[in-house]
Amino acid sequence: MAGGFRRGKRTPKLQARGELQAVEREGPFKEWLGMPDLYRYALKVDGEAYSYQTEDAELPVAIGDRVVFRYKETKAGNWIDRNSLGKAIDPSEYQ
């Protein structure tokens, strides 16, 4: 077997959920030619700060919503994985 490949033992993604308290948008940014404009969002969820980068000018969630997402911790802060941000569904609200 070739060296350098890890077998199994992948670190699981971190997950968080909570109430979205604040949203700030920056952008659009043009990273390089041919790439769509990117927007950077600074989100505050249950008192914790997270960053989110997407091509969408509007988020699928609003302040006050219960949200759920995957993220990773970096030196620059907590970054939410692309396309993982969404509303948390409470099963007790359905019939």
Image (cartoon, helix red, strand yellow):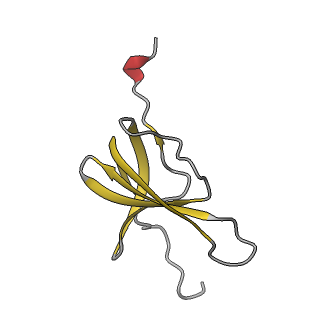
Work out whether residue 84 can be spotted. Answer: yes
The quarter of the image holding the N terminus is bottom right
Q: Is residue 25 left or right of residue 15?
A: right
The residue lying toward the viewer, choosing from 6 and 72, is 72
Which residue is located at x 49 percent, y 59 percent?
A: 81
* Tally of marks: 0
Percent of width and height locating residue 58: 56, 47
Q: Relative to 76, does residue 89 appear above or below in the rendering?
A: above
Which residue is located at x 53 percent, y 42 percent?
A: 60
Which residue is located at x 56 percent, y 52 percent?
A: 83
The residue lying toward the viewer, choosing from 15 and 18, is 18
Q: Relative to 86, does residue 83 appear above or below in the rendering?
A: below
Percent of width and height locating residue 69: 43, 49
Q: Is residue 37 left or right of residue 40?
A: right
Q: Relative to 47, does residue 35 appear above or below in the rendering?
A: below
Which residue is located at x 41 percent, y 59 percent?
A: 71
Q: Is residue 54 left or right of residue 75?
A: right
Work out whether residue 17 can be spotted. Answer: no
Q: Is residue 94 left or right of residue 57?
A: left
**Residue at the left extreme?**
47
Percent of width and height locating residue 38: 59, 64
**Residue at the bottom extreme?**
3
